[in-house]
Image: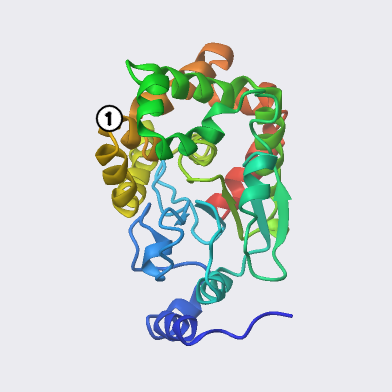
C-alpha cells in the first residue's frame, strides 16, 4: 500500500501543480536547469545528487526529455518524509549499481510499488576497492599511506576503465540501457553509493549516445562536486583534522574530469564510436539504440 503523502510532500506537490507541473509528465520540474539537484529542490538532503538526466540539448537541436530517467546517490538513510517526496516522481524501477556488500550495509529505502534491480557493475572486480574506499576516510593516516602520492588518482582511473571493460559492467549497463529504452519501464532511477562514478559513467554514456556534446556531458558529470562536496564538508574537515590530506578526501567524495576521460578514452580505443560501444560492448544493436533515442527525444 502506498504511503500517504507527508505535509512536506503535499506542499511540494501543491507547489508543482500551481506552477503548471500537473500539466507535464510526473517528475518534470520546469523551473530547474538541466543537471540541477532535484533532491535539494524537493528538500531531500539525503540525496543531493538526485537529478533528472534530461533537459540537455543535443548537437542536432533536440532536447533530452525530462521525467524519464533519474540519477542519484544511495537511498539510505531516507526519512519517511523523503520517501514520500520520492513518490512524486512516480518511479517504476530502481536500478542499483552497487556491490552486494554495499547493498547489505545500506539497502535502498524506496516507495512501495517501485521494483528494485541490483546491477552489480563491479561484480568481476575482486577487490572492488572503489566501492570500499570511503571507509578509509575514518582512518586519515592510513588513507594518506594507502592513497597518497597519486595512488588515489591511479586507482580511480583504473576503475573508470573497468566501467568499459569488465564483463559485469557490460552486463549491468546493457540491462540498464535496454530497460531505459522501454517506455513501460520508466520513469526509472539508477544510482550507486555516491551517484558520481558508476552512475556518472552510465549518465555520460547515455547522454553521449543521445547526441549531447562532449563538453556538456563532462559539465554534467562535474556537477556531482556541486552537490556532494558541500554536504560532506564536515567529513572532509574531520579527515583533515585527523591528519589526512584534504586532496584525498575531495578525490574520494568528488569527481575529476580526468577520471571520466579515462572511460571515454577506453571506449574510443576499443570501439571508436559510442554506437559501437553500445552494439559490440553492450550488445545493444542499432534498433535498440534507436529505441533509446526515440524514447528520450520524444519521437
How is colour applied across the structure in the image? Answer: rainbow
The residue nearer to you, when weighing 243 against 198, is 243
Q: Dot 1, crowdedness within 10 Å: few (<14), some or many (≥20)?
A: some
Which residue is the site of mark 1? 245
Indicate the position of residue 209 as horizontal and vertical percent values: 53, 35
Where residue 19 appears, x then y in whole percent? 37, 81
User: Where on the picture, by quarter, is residue 258?
Assistant: top left
- For the residue pair 221 and 154, the one nearer the viewer reads as 154
In the rendered view, does 17 fall on the left or right side of 131? left
Q: Is residue 299 visible?
A: yes
| Image coords of residue 38 (percent x, y) | 42, 62
Left or right of 223? Residue 72 is right
Q: Residue at x 56, y 71 (%)?
A: 83
| Residue 25 visible in this rendered orientation of the protein | no
Toward which corner of the image does residue 37 lie, by quadrant? bottom left
Residue occupying image coordinates x 54% and y 53%: 74
Residue 98 in percent (x, y) is at: 62, 41
Residue displayed at 69% across by 36% down: 172
Q: Is residue 210 above or below residue 283?
A: below
Which corner quadrant of the image does residue 170 belong to?
top right
Secondary structure found at label 1: loop
Q: Is residue 5 above or below residue 40?
A: below
Between 79 and 223, the one nearer to me in the picture: 79
Of residue 191 and residue 19, the one placed in the foreground of this image is 191
Q: Quadrant of the N terminus?
A: bottom right
Residue 139 position (above or below residue 293)? above
How many numbered marks, from 0 up?
A: 1
Q: Residue furthest top?
A: 269
Amino acid at each position: 500500500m502506498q504511503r500517504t503523502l507527508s505535509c512536506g510532500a503535499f506542499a511540494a506537490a501543491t507547489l508543482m501543480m500551481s506552477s503548471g507541473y500537473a500539466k507535464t509528465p510526473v517528475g518534470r520540474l520546469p523551473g530547474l536547469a538541466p543537471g540541477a539537484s532535484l533532491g535539494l529542490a524537493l528538500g531531500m538532503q539525503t540525496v543531493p545528487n538526485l537529478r533528472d538526466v534530461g533537459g540537455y540539448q543535443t548537437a542536432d537541436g533536440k532536447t533530452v526529455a525530462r521525467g524519464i530517467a533519474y540519477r542519484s546517490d544511495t537511498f539510505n538513510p531516507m526519512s519517511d518524509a523523503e520517501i514520500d517526496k520520492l513518490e512524486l516522481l512516480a518511479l517504476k524501477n530502481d536500478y542499483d549499481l552497487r556491490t552486494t556488500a554495499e547493498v547489505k550495509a545500506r539497502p535502498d529505502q524506496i516507495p512501495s510499488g517501485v521494483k528494485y534491480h541490483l546491477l552489480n557493475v563491479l561484480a568481476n572486480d575482486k577487490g572492488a576497492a572503489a566501492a570500499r574506499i570511503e571507509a578509509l576516510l575514518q582512518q586519515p593516516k592510513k588513507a594518506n599511506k594507502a592513497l597518497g602520492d597519486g595512488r588515489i588518482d591511479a586507482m580511480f582511473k583504473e576503475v573508470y576503465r573497468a566501467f568499459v571493460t569488465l564483463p559485469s559492467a557490460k552486463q549491468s549497463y546493457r540491462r540498464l540501457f535496454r530497460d531505459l529504452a522501454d517506455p513501460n519501464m520508466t520513469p526509472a532511477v539508477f544510482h550507486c553509493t555516491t551517484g558520481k562514478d558508476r552512475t556518472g559513467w552510465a549518465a555520460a554514456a547515455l547522454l553521449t549516445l543521445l547526441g549531447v556534446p562532449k563538453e556538456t556531458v563532462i559539465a554534467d558529470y562535474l556537477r556531482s562536486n556541486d552537490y556532494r562536496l558541500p554536504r560532506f564538508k564536515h567529513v572532509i574537515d574531520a579527515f583533515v583534522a585527523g591528519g589526512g590530506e584534504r586532496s584525498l578526501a575531495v578525490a574520494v567524495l568528488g569527481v575529476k574530469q580526468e577520471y571520466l576521460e579515462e572511460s571515454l578514452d577506453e571506449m574510443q580505443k576499443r570501439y571508436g564510436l559510442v554506437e559501437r560501444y553500445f552494439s559490440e560492448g553492450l550488445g545493444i544493436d542499432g534498433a535498440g539504440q534507436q529505441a533509446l533515442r526515440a524514447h528520450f527525444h520524444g519521437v
